[in-house]
Amino acid sequence: MVLLNNTLSLPLGILLIFMVNEVDYLSRTPLLRLPSFWVVMTLSGFLGLAISFTSMWFLHQTGATTYSLVGSLNKIPLSIAGILLFHVPTSLENSASILFG
C-alpha cells in the first residue's frame, strides 16, 4: 500500500521539484552534509516502514472493521490530549464534536 502510494506520487513530486527549483536549494544547503541528518532520516524511514508493517499485521490479525474502528477511535484521546497540551480554550462546539466523534 505504501509502495503504491509513493509510486503514484513520484511523477508529481518530480515535477514540483523542478518547478520550484528545489534542486538548487538542496545543492546549497549545509544540512545535507551533516552525518547526523542522514542518521535521523534513515531512522525516520525505518520507523515509517515499521509503522506500515505493524498496521498491515494488525489488519491481518483482526479484520477491516476492527482496523477501521480503532483508527477512528484513536482520534478522541488525541483530541483531548491536544486540548490539554496546547491549552486550547474549550467551547461547547469543541466538546460536542469530540463527544460526537
Image (cartoon, rainbow, N blue to C red):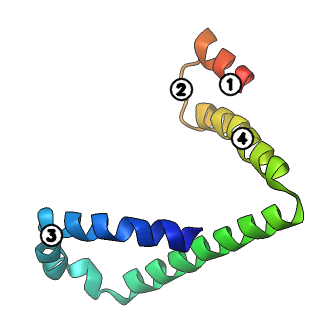
Residue 72 located left or right of residue 11: right
Q: Quadrant of residue 19?
A: bottom left
Q: Label 3 crowding class (10 Å Cα cut-off): few <14, some 14-19, many 20+? A: few
Res 76 → quadrant:
top right
- Measuring from the top left, give residue 52's x and y in whole percent: 65, 69
- Identify the mark at residue 98; answer none if there is no mark: 1
Question: Which residue position is annotated with label 4?
Answer: 72
Helix, strand or loop under label 2: loop
Q: What residue type is labelled 1?
A: Ile
Residue closer to the observer: 100 or 85: 100
Pick the front one: 91 or 45: 45
Marks 1 and 2, how far apart at CA: 13 Å
Residue that lies at the very extreme toward the right in this rendered image: 62
Q: Residue at x 21, y 80 (%)?
A: 30
Q: What element carries label 4?
A: helix
**Which numbered circle lies on residue 88?**
2
For marks 1 and 4 on the same chain, the one whose residue lies earlier in the sequence: 4
